[in-house]
Amino acid sequence: MSSKTELVSVLQRNPQNIRNICILAHVDHGKTTLADSLIASNGIISPRLAGKLRYMDSREDEQIRGITMKSSAISLYFKSEEDEEYLINLIDSPGHVDFSSEVSTAVRLCDGAIVVIDAVEGVCPQTQAVLRQAWLEKLKPILVFNKIDRLITELKMSPDEAAIHLQQLLEKVNAVTGSLFSAEVLEKFSKSTTSSEKVLQPGEQTVYDWSAGLEFSDDSDLYFTPNNGNVIFASATDGWGFRIQQFSKIYAKKLGIHERILDKTLWGDYYANVKAKKILKGAQAKGKRPLFAQFVLDNIWSLYDTILTRRDKEKCEKITQSLGISVSARDKRLIQTDPKGYLKALCTQWIPLSQAVLSGTCEHLPSPLNITGDRVEGLMCGSTYSFDAFPPNTQALKTDFVSCDPSGKVIVLVSKMVAIDPSHLPKAKKKTLTDEEIQERREAAKQRLLDKQNAADTSETNGVATQPATESNDITESEPHFVAFARVFSGTLRKGQKLFMLGPKHDPSHIQEGDDEIVNDLHSYPHISEVTIGDLYLLMGRELSSLCDVPPGNIVGISGLEDQVLKSATLSTTVACPPFNPLSKDNAPIIRVAVEPKLLSQMNQLVDGLKLLNQADPCVRVLVQETGEHVIVCAGEVHLQRCLDDLRDRFAKIKINVSAPIVPFRETVIPRPKVDMMNELIGGQDKDLMQRFKSKAPEDDDMIEDDQSAQKSKRRNYFERKGCVRIITPGNEHEFVLRAAPLPEEVTKLLEIYADDLKILDLRDVEFREKLNRKSQLNNIKTVDEQSENVKINLDTTKRLTDLYLKIKEEFEKTKRKTWVGACDNIWSFGPRRNGCNVLINRVNGYRRPSVWSALLGECPHEKEYRELDQSIVSGFQLATLAGPLCEEPMQGVALILEEWNRGEEEISNEPTDLQESFKKSSKGSLSGQLISTMKEAFRTTFQNQPQRLMTAMYTCDVQATAEVLGKVYAVLGKREGRVVKEEMKEGSDVFDITAALPVAESFGFAEEIRKKTSGLASPQLVFSHWEVISSDPFWVPTTEEEIQHYGEKADFENQATKYMNAVRRRKGLFVEEKTVQHAEKQRTLTKNK
Ligand SMILES: Nc1nc2c(ncn2[C@@H]2O[C@H](COP(=O)(O)OP(=O)(O)OP(=O)(O)O)[C@@H](O)[C@H]2O)c(=O)[nH]1
Ligand SMILES: [Mg+2]
């Protein structure tokens, strides 16, 4: 163990002086450059290279592209002015949106964050995202305004202008934090007022003052204020940074004003009356220079002016003397050849960035000992389950977290798995040897030489040569080695220790007390397995060094888990520990490509490589499609490129073919237009029907009529008009009538927003169903665990689901259409995957089966309430919504309505239906099985009877561009069907903030094109935002004379929707109606004039 590692090992035992922090920012705001300065302060890299090397960007592609693609950790030593020694575990994170899941893995392990903001670009979309992420994970942040040098050299601001600019910037940042804070307070307040039951007196008003909660909440510690010391002004490339407190110290001596007063006034609307030695308020109103500009910025501005602009050697000498800095002779020579280098050398001595950042960190960011109970609860149960519902021994673990006790129960969180080249492992590195070891080796070498000579002598006689012995600890394998990126929250982690790995579905309430010892038979607990801790490593950026044990509160690398842990895990000595709340994912993976090996024989290598890739990246998804294709799903183009590079060069090490990016689409139906139905009429409908459409616009008509047969025929008429489909089961046992309708837009949106909650509702539903099955098997005998099953969903989730129910109900009622009357209470299921944006609605007269919401009430419905075959309909619905008829993409925003379900005892008209064929085809198997596929077909057919549309995924595109390149950005956007949503000019600069919507399908190469067209001045950020209906009909063909004239009879022109649909169909190997050249001779006319 090197002396440095030994020192760290000692510091690791004092949690009071440990800080686990991450650097967060928008892309390119200077995180890695800032990290360089901190690393240089520890002598790991040369201060001259700090800012140029970007040490934490260890991958080749990170260096080439200039962006960070992964989060990586390094442990740093810091000695404060009070001689306290600190251990700072620093994680540098990426800022590009494609890698936002890497940020989640970093944030989870830390207690504090350094939020970096480019002083010119200001608050950008990712700045807001990381502030939010830090807030949600309850990290305490400090702020760094970076690139202040750009205000001087690029924007040519005066110190006074810069002071105002920074003031405004700070207000914007605080506005973001303020909104996060008030949202949380209001939520808490609303909860406390609704949960404490209030008895209303007659006449009393039920209006709550929603802002009331804000008054009582303390937010003084929340905001960034330079006066408190949590704001740092810096230039990471030039190596300087300061907090105003540093200047207070200097001026306190100079001016004889108390330091504390300066601390409070150096930032803000204060000015100095130097003669009277007084500091007064109201600089702006009186037209005076604020202290910040006069005492702080002036110094820096004049330094830049003297060195960079005037290169005044003499003045530089004077300045260095007055500042008490000694600049080496070598650096002094730089003033002519490399003034920037000189400036950096001078500044790093005068106001070193590392000092400002690290002292700010130690003073303002919490140690692992300060972890709050709130955060612990958040980690343990998230927002879905209730902490109070955990069994007592699980709740007791909270104290282990908070006390950070080295002898407590071991609790470790693995946030991601990192693939490390074996050459970076400590085993592979040459050690520095002590004198004794050198002596020993020398002796050994001498001995070997002697042996060799002896052997040579003997081999002359018997002809055998001995091989030199190879070193035993050589690492020959070139396979990447997986190291878990983890934090020890409690207890001491040791090499060789055996811990339980608790899967995401592990529920401590299912384990009886005292089970820790009984869990020898792990097979009966599917979500628990046992792991043995391998080597422990100190993470040092590009290097690792070995550790024997790790006390609580530290970040560590663990080897030996690659066979058990896929991406993240919870490890503990006790099974009472719940799995950690899953990491938040802001940017859902959306683009996918299919990969295959160039040589088919290398398929196995590809499969193994994909497995490794899946493990090494927290965000990527690797799957095998039904077609047998291997598919990689990524967050964006940059992410995709990195995954493919990794697969090719590190994990599979073979040449691969990559398909064109596969873009997801959705299928939907839209309301029928009231006039001119002609163009909307689609395949499979007869002339008769057309006639009917023309003669009468479809409206929901009342069907109350006395005469029964007339009523029946009217109803049939109605069904036909609505594009209903009828199925009759063999033997005329059941008749179903169903139809599709577009859901109100707002309802679809709600379902999208609440998708995660619906998943929980479904879990509940599944639980009930299992219970029903068990009940029928056990003949209604109550089992022990039945009572305990109701308590898991916490109040928040129940409240959200109730909200959803009420909102959907309201939206349905708002439409005032008969179709939606009472629809909310008759929802059978959501789909696909039981939580999608489509609903199955029950409109069958006389069948009141429990709706999907019944799971919310916590009462297990009775088996008798369901008809036989009920679940087959649901399954058919799930299948249909998973793959629609346009191009087998999932449906969205469609209501599939079961209008009628007549059974044998009721009268069934036995006119044959088309779908009866499918029953005939699958004559074997049970009826319920057959019904599933027939239902699926029926749902698809009724979908086709409506006007169908394709939906495309849309990105929100954020670009910053100067006025000169604005036109070019618009041109690229226009060419790719983009739509500008917002355009704003940034105050104090000529930079425009543009927000646009861009179809994902048109986005490939977009960022690159913009960068090229603007010579790198604008680079867009693309984040998935929503699904949008493509207005053109994919089946449209010209019908009127004008249209035929315009587009040609065969419509040579292909509309956007048709193009997308056909491309997907072709890819999936489905039938595509291709246009064939009908009149080939016509083409010859082109060359007639020759
Ligand atoms: N003028 C100026 N440029 C800076 C400063 N700090 C960083 N830069 C430049 O900004 C660019 C981005 O710096 P990085 O440190 O890679 O930014 P990052 O935040 O780590 O970027 P990602 O990790 O990709 O999100 C580099 O070209 C740096 O040289 C600064 O203080 N002043
Ligand atoms: Mg970086």
Image: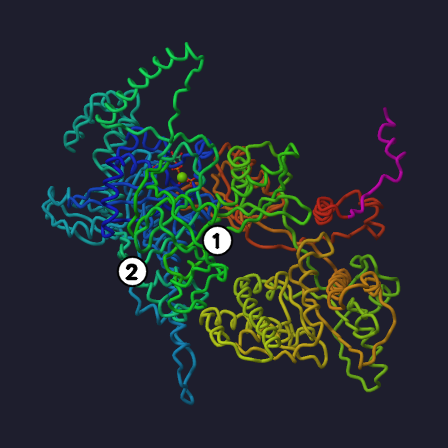
- Magenta residue span: 1071-1090
Tell whether label 1 touches label 2 (CB within 8 Å): no
Residue 298 at x, y = what percent?
Answer: 23, 38
Q: Is residue 1081 magenta?
A: yes
Residue 446 at x, y = what percent?
Answer: 28, 17
Q: Sequence order check: which comes first, mark 2 or mark 1?
A: 2
Decide: few, some or many residues near mark 2? Use Cα within 10 Å; few <14, some 14-19, many ≥20.
Answer: some
Residue corresponding to mark 1:
585
Residue occupying the point 70% across, 76% down: 867
Q: Amino acid at mark 1?
A: Lys
Q: Is residue 706 magenta?
A: no
Tell me which corner region of the image, top left, top right, bottom left or bottom right, holds residue 297. Answer: top left
Give 812 or 571, whichever is nearer the viewer: 571
Report the residue that reaches farthest toward the bottom. 202
Residue 651 at x, y = what percent?
Answer: 52, 37
Residue corresponding to mark 2:
402
Residue occupying the point 20% across, 53% down: 264
Locate the N terminus by quadrant.
top left
As drawn, is 889 to the left or to the right of 1011?
Answer: right
Q: Secondary structure at mark 2?
A: helix
What sort of colour scheme is used for the picture?
Answer: rainbow
Residue 1004 at x, y = what percent?
Answer: 59, 40
As drawn, is 767 to the left or to the right of 383?
Answer: right
